Amino acid sequence: GAVVSQHPSWVICKSGTSVKIECRSLDFQATTMFWYRQFPKQSLMLMATSNEGSKATYEQGVEKDKFLINHASLTLSTLTVTSAHPEDSSFYICSARGGTGSYSNQPQHFGDGTRLSIL
Amino acid sequence: GDSVTQMEGPVTLSEEAFLTINCTYTATGYPSLFWYVQYPGEGLQLLLKATKADDKGSNKGFEATYRKETTSFHLEKGSVQVSDSAVYFCATNTGGFKTIFGAGTRLFVKA
């Protein structure tokens, strides 16, 4: 089945550091990937839609200069949290739709998430 | 716009109890419906899905039926186990690229 790999799974770093998170679709091509942020005991908050070969589409209130998204190939999207601060600490999850059937019927396949802790 | 509403948690049950987590949706057209499960510290996994009215999705003893007349997709399991403790998300694909998620329902199963 469709598998999405996300790396790293855990990052602890100092304030001011930039952190890159990778999301790969391992056995299917994903022209569109999604980046979510999840606060403790809350639902997923869509941050942006990553489009292969073009600019990402950010949701309202998400700083595009803070959260840089690059989708350079059909199997890789990256999220870079620039100059991270403690308030950026969170659980970040990527996903991509894939599988058989029409695109509208395909489920999301999620990475295992990245727990980011900024000291 | 499209939306998903699911029952608030947490839901606490004893092992072998019957589980129902309600989910209703608002969407135009004929959306596909999904249940995802998130175990502690992990990403989300697809649990089951249904792509058209009256379809029943099932997996690992869980099932949900796509009810267009009531715009519902309630999740049920006849006998829960401690290992089912997790957060469950109901979701629907919109006509575009996005997936709309419910707020999630946390389930605790006691031995």
Image: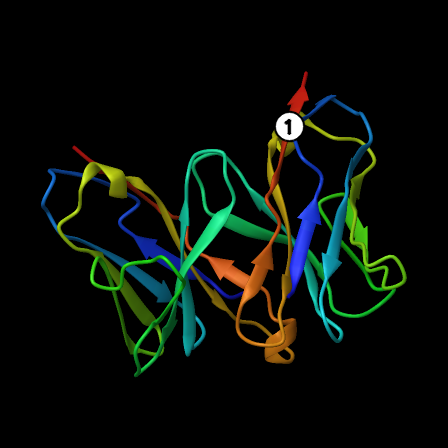
Quadrant in which residue B19 is drawn: top right
Residue nearer the viewer, A106 or A68: A68
Seen in the picture, residue A2 relative to B29 is either above or below; the reply is above
Residue nearer the viewer, A116 or A3: A116
Please state the horizontal and vertical placement of residue A4, each as a whole percent of the image.
42, 61
Please state the horizontal and vertical placement of residue A81, each as a whole percent of the image.
21, 54
Tally of numbered tags: 1
Q: Amino acid at mark 1?
A: Pro
Location of mark 1 (residue): B10
- Label 1 SS: loop
Apparent side of residue A52 relative to residue B58 in the rendered image (left or right): left
Q: Chain for mark 1? A: B
**Dot 1: few (<14), some (14–19), or many (≥20) neighbours within 10 Å?**
few
Q: Residue at (82%, 31%) from the top-left corner? A: B18
Q: Residue at (65%, 64%) from the top-left corner? A: B2
The outermost residue toward the bottom is A53
Seen in the picture, residue B43 relative to B7 is either above or below; the reply is below
Q: Which quarter of the rendered picture does the C terminus of chain A lie within?
A: top left
Coloring scheme used: rainbow
Please state the horizontal and vertical placement of residue B58, each as a whole percent of the image.
76, 53
Q: Which quarter of the rendered picture does the N terminus of chain A lie within?
A: bottom right
The outermost residue toward the top is B111
Q: Residue at (57%, 72%) from the top-left corner? A: A99
Seen in the picture, residue B35 relative to B77 is either above or below; the reply is below
Please state the horizontal and vertical placement of residue B50, each as a whole percent of the image.
75, 63
